[in-house]
Image (cartoon, grey):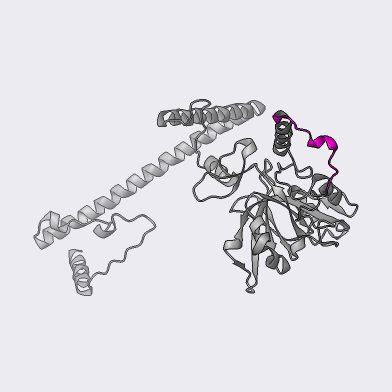
Amino acid sequence: MSVVGDNSLLEEPHAEPSVQETPQPVPAEAAAPTSTPDKVQPEKAAEVETKDDVEQFSGLPIANRTVPAEKWAEEVRRPNRRYVSFSHIPLYFGSDRSKLRVKENIIIGVLYYNSAKDTQRLATGEQYLRWRLTDLSQQSRQIVLQLRWGAYLHWRQGKPAAIARRGAIFAILNPVLVEMAESYPGGPKEAVMRVEKGLQVEKLGDCPALGSCKKQGCKNPCDLRERQSHCRMHKNIAYAEKSVPRINGGGGVDGRTTALLKNQQKKSSQKVARALKAARLEFNPEAEAKELEDKAQNEKLTKMELTKSICERLLDNDVDANENYVRCIRNDTNLEDCSSSRVPKLGRGLSSSSTLEVTVGPNKRRIEDCDELEVF
């Protein structure tokens, strides 16, 4: 799938198994019968080598290599090329990294999402493929790769589309950094990159260590080497939902234990506050006497304000009671009918900052004014 040129990863095509099918001279002893153990042992050795095979630049476990390890090492170690890990993408890519572009950058990752079945479109209407790759590191770094123009036409169908499946290890040559965006709200930033030629992407093999998150509907990657069962996002969500600490060996905690923990935390904070206060008083001995004096003065002012408000209320009630009694005798009515309150019935449930408008009829108000004049 790759051709000779600066825009290709390999100098010679390697999709065909012609490199491995070179004829070799058959020795005369090969015609002699061999025992069964002699045939089985090389096969077992090959299986062991496949299981322990690791891509030397990214450290990813690799199986079913499409490019021999020696040939791939020669390609990456060419003077005009260098391998860039996911963590160093912001260092070697971007508009302000022109001095670092003297070499061709190569990125290696494991494909875990391909939008081939769900065509993506830009705001201009252009169709493109959206891949998501991971490096299966402890930080679980991920990148988004946009395949546009020639890369989209090359990888959208046919044999290239068939090999671009989940778990495939790909090498990307000279991708363009589009932006650094959050993979999910509050999550780490991941690089969004772009390629426009099909030969900028090369499959190296398959990664047997790629797993899937066990959360229903989630296809984010997990590292089977670390026996991970959930992706990084769902781990963070699970930790955030834990409002109280867990007890070692006991799993969760009940309500009583939670109350005890909160009470202990409150006592600890009070103890720290007392210690700080004692240290402050020890540093300034006169502060304690001043603090006691200010406290006594504040208590005295509070009592005076309370006494004043009670006296004002009693005086107001006496005035209202006298007026109500005089009105009751003059009109020959019951005292209960003439009683009034300074607070309207509809406004007794209101606060001090609330307002209530009361409209008194003009005729009734005029009669009351006349009655008051007659009394005097």
Residue beneath the point at 50% across and 51% down: 217
Q: Can you say whether 124 is above or below 79 in the image?
A: below
Does residue 116 appear left or right of residue 265 in this picture? right
Q: Can you say whether 282 is above or below 351 in the image?
A: above
Q: Can you say whether 245 is above or below 333 in the image?
A: above
Range of magenta residues:
23-36
Q: Which image quarter holds the C terminus?
A: bottom left
Residue 106 x, y percent position in the rendering: 79, 53
Task: Report the predominant secondary structure element of the magenta stretch.
Answer: loop
Residue beneath the point at 75% across and 32% down: 33
In the rendered image, the residue lying farthest to the right is 79
Q: Is residue 136 magenta?
A: no
Instruction: Out of 44 and 293, give the one closest to the viewer.
Output: 44
Q: How many numbered tags mark residues here?
A: 0
Residue beneath the point at 28% across and 56% down: 343
Residue 93 x, y percent position in the rendering: 79, 57
Does residue 306 appear left or right of residue 268 in this picture? left
The image quadrant that residue 157 belongs to is bottom right
Does residue 277 appear left or right of residue 6 in this picture? left
Residue 278 x, y percent position in the rendering: 60, 26
In the rendered image, the residue lying farthest to the left is 332
Instruction: Out of 173 and 376, give the one closest to the viewer.
Output: 173
Does residue 85 appear left or right of residue 306 in this picture? right
